[in-house]
Amino acid sequence: MATTTPTMNRPMNLGASAADHLDRVDALAKVTGAAKYGRDRYLPGSLFAALIRCPWGSAELLSDNAAEVGKLAGVVEIKISRREGTYHGRDVGYVLADSVVALKRAMNALKLEWKRREVKTRIEDTVKEPPAINEDAKKVLDAAAKKLSAVYSTPVQTHSSLETHGCVVDHRGDSATVYASTQGTFAFRDGLDEALKLKGSDFEIVCEYVGGGFGSKLGGPGKEGLNAARISAARGKPVYLFVNREEEHLDTGNRPSSMTFAELAFENDGTITGGQILTFGGVGVARGGGGCDVPSGRYNFGDLRRAHTDVSFNAGGPRAMRAPGKPQGAFAEELMLDEVALACNVDPLELRMRLARSGNHKEMMKAGAKLIGWANRIPTGTQTGTIRRGMGVGLCSWGLFPARAEGEVVIYRDGSVEARTGTQDIGTGQRTIMGVVAAEAVGINPDEVRCSIGSSKLPVGPGSGGSVTAPNTAPPMRAAALDAKNKLLTIIAKELNVEASALEIVKGEVLRGGQRVMSFKDACQRITGDSITGRSDAAKVDTSGKGHSDGVQFVELSVDTETGVIHLHNVVALQSCGRVLARKTAESQIIGGVIQGLSYALFEQRVLDRVTGAMVNANLESYKILGPKDMPHITPVLWSKGQTKVCSLGEPPVIPTAGAVACAVLNAIGAPVRSLPITPAKVLAALAGVGGKKNEDGGAR
Amino acid sequence: MNSFTYVRARNQAEALSSLKDAKFSLPVFKGGGLDLVDHMKEGLIAPDALIDVRGVRGEGDLAGNGPDAVEMKGEVIRFPAAMTLAQAANSAVLRKFAPVVAMTAGSAATPAVRNVATVAGNLLQRPRCWYYRNSQFNCLKKGGSTCFAVEGENAYHAIFSTGSSPGPCHIVHPSNLAPALMVCDAVVHTVGNADRKEIPIGKLFHGPEKGVTSEHTLEAGELITHITMKARPVSGFYAIKEKQSFDWPLVFACVAIEMAGERIGKAEVVAGAVAPVPWALPAVAAALKGVDPKDERALTEACALAGKGAKPMRDNGYKVGLLSVAVKRAVMKAAGVAIAGEEGR
């Protein structure tokens, strides 16, 4: 399904990849519904399960009518295994029924009498006072020309995967098939053997299509998978267990909330000399996992005292979410820098050019400044009209991490080619780029390769986390394709009585010394068996070496100072990702990251009722997500200067966006909004405070 | 959701008799069905019969015929109860003679919702309060004894009250069409109640102090058939929303004016999302008299009265100032005065 129309608004990316005009190969299947997700698997004779959950932040279950509801038609089993919950959504048991209707009827009929207990719902319930300033930091602050004392906060962001968590387990006694919504095919397998009472080789995890995960579907089968597996194993019937939208918000992880207490010392020119940054992560009932990565290491912050503490309260705990800990920290860090720049009357981009540690970032900042039109930026605090424009900038970085991956490429006698990897596609374009890699190495067009992915019976691949998938699966897939090609050319070489190395395959033709020998299809007919299989040899695949995924994002917006409403206009997102495999899916990764970051900046937040601890907006109506009319124009710029490897791309683009938005708001209205999401109410409050409190030494407060 | 019987009423008599059918224990009328199905899914109500009234034809045709379901005879505009919001938004008659209604209808929810949602459904939908909408909160509206918003999360709740003191329930009325119809002096026409056939739109709603489990004054079995109203060719609407796609306004205002030369001769102002009922602002309307809508300073001064008497809760004080802005911009919309930042949007 290749198109010939380039994406007109980003000519800089043309030629970025070998498959510039290739659309996502499964786009049509996904938009027509032909693609079968785990949720779509309704097997004959299936049982349906739902988890019973605590409706309050903390409560004790006094009584239930489970025995009565268990007698309803179609209800197979009701099990209540706990009689208390310490967060809204905590599972305490399950209901099993022989149809969706019977299951819902039973869930509605279930009357549970809960006794509510007192709750904590926020970091502030524990951290009531700003923490003390360390003695060493005090010395640096006392010696400073200027100071910034500020508190930054971010809310809990839920993953809101379109396909909720769950799976269908079909246990058949000595084998099983599990249709899972997972971003870790093999982690899911490795976590299920005990529950299924089977060896990993006796069952298959199938996740051909996955409707999003953002990190929340990384950690194995989870309670959905384990419950479904145990029940299916015990009853010998397929079990369907997918959570609903409300449960998805409550109990499938989130990006934890954060608070950052910053005490910064700086020179009159904005050079930061140090101070203290203490951060807190709001991790719900978890004990840890609440990172807030500030300072990020991208800027020089001088002699800094730094500590992080996770704070527990009555709410669902975090899970990895697209660049865990990074957007929280970047929001505080970027806004802090703009506040320092404002206090010193320095252009914030110029300050970043001085404080940034990486030459890459500096080059990207220069290029991005031209694209966004930074020269037209109006100095902060000088606008007086109702509508005020603002520009902001933020940085990101990401490393390259190793992961175990293998690949197989099968060339069939009829000329068809199959690329095989067990790893899954959570929307990143994995299926598309595996085909591109295999096709390029074999010497044929990408649309002539069929990709088989998302099965634990296929060659092992990593979970989609840490942005490791493409960098670690592309090299073995390439190695496998080269191996298959060499095996094929060896057959032809024998027939022609030449060395295999004298032959090559270019655009579907076998060439010798640049001259056509035969077509690829004709060559395939020489295969004596049904097919030949090229394999990657893990020992020989080089996934080592350095690779950075630096990025810079610019945001241009306007603020309506009467209503506090922010209108996003433009985002320029420069992102290095090494070698680009398919332009459109790479651009889509960046655009998706930016959208998620904008949504985090302006709208998203889990709202817990402070009295009962219940989440009051566990839906997609009042849990607000960026919509079409809120979208700015986004220009993703693929930056591969000085890199040849396939590098990380999934996570970094979500990191700098919210910080850049906050800086643009400060630029527009002259006052910082230090708390996400930046709602009209907060903008108006910040505006009302302009010209009010100032620091003794002139610094921003 | 529970199982139910679906009845498609072909005429008014069928609709009314189905509602009284003894074999149903909780029959309800269904228009577009959006809010109704939401309630059923959340388990807030479990009706055993849904009587679909969109297909009611003949005398008192509920859905209206032809490309424009809106009729105009002399000064009176008439449209059927089951007209969709999309029909209202696109009606040539409303756009010309009552732009406030067309604008309001066109700004609600999403195109998909507007294609199904009906005018009467918009008026009679239940509040969006998240305590009301979540089944585990047994709030006042559900027969409980507590309004959870008082101590809880009240950023989107009411800043005005209908009774002598705030509450007891702090919802904002959810209909955005109701304030628009109020500035057009609309009359709601009903069947099913022998004592009355017409209700001025302002009397269709009541505050929580007059009964907290419902927001309207219709009786069981009373069905809205159509609405009549006056032409208000100089009228406008302005909503302030956090999100521009699919969001409920933080505050909004509907305004109808009559010009006397360059100045406002007469005004009617009704606000939404600030009180448990559509909230008339007669003091602002009076202050607008004599103001030149192009004179933003004078306009701002008159509209500053909008928040007078507000008693905000812990987290919704921002609405007080926003309301004045919404009223001002609604006047500007009505008078065709450009609003800053709206060029090219």
Image: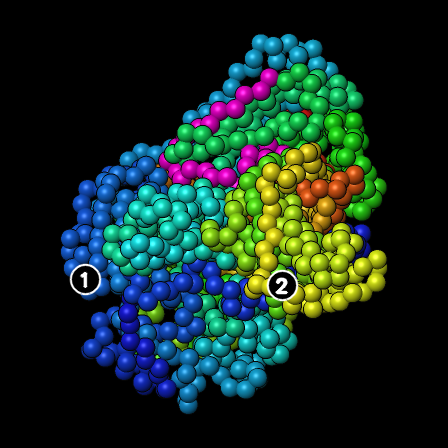
Q: Which residue is mark 1?
A: A72
- B173 vs B138, left or right, is right
Q: Is residue A487 above or below residue B31?
A: above
Q: What's the CA distance linking mark 2 and mark 1? A: 62 Å
The answer to whether residue B343 is seen in the rendering is no
Residue A322 lies in the magenta-colored region: yes
The answer to which image quadrant residue A574 occupies is top right
**Residue B92, image x, y percentages:** 62, 79
Which mark identifies residue A527? 2
Residue density around tag 2, few if under 14, some if 14–19, many if 20 or more, within 10 Å: some
Q: Is residue B100 above or below residue A163?
A: below
Instruction: Using the image as rendered, state which of residue B30 and residue A257 is in the foreground.
Output: A257
Secondary structure, mark 2, is loop
Magenta stretch: give its range.
Answer: A305-331
Q: How many marks?
A: 2
Look at the image and tell me in which quarter the C terminus of chain A lies: top right
- A360 vs B64, left or right, is right
Task: Please name the residue shown 22% across and 60% down the image.
Answer: A75
Parent chain of label 1: A
The answer to which image quadrant residue A504 occupies is bottom right
Instruction: Using the image as rendered, state which of residue A676 and residue A441 is in the foreground.
Output: A441
Task: Please name the residue shown 52% across and 44% down the image.
Answer: A463
Residue B103 lies in the magenta-colored region: no
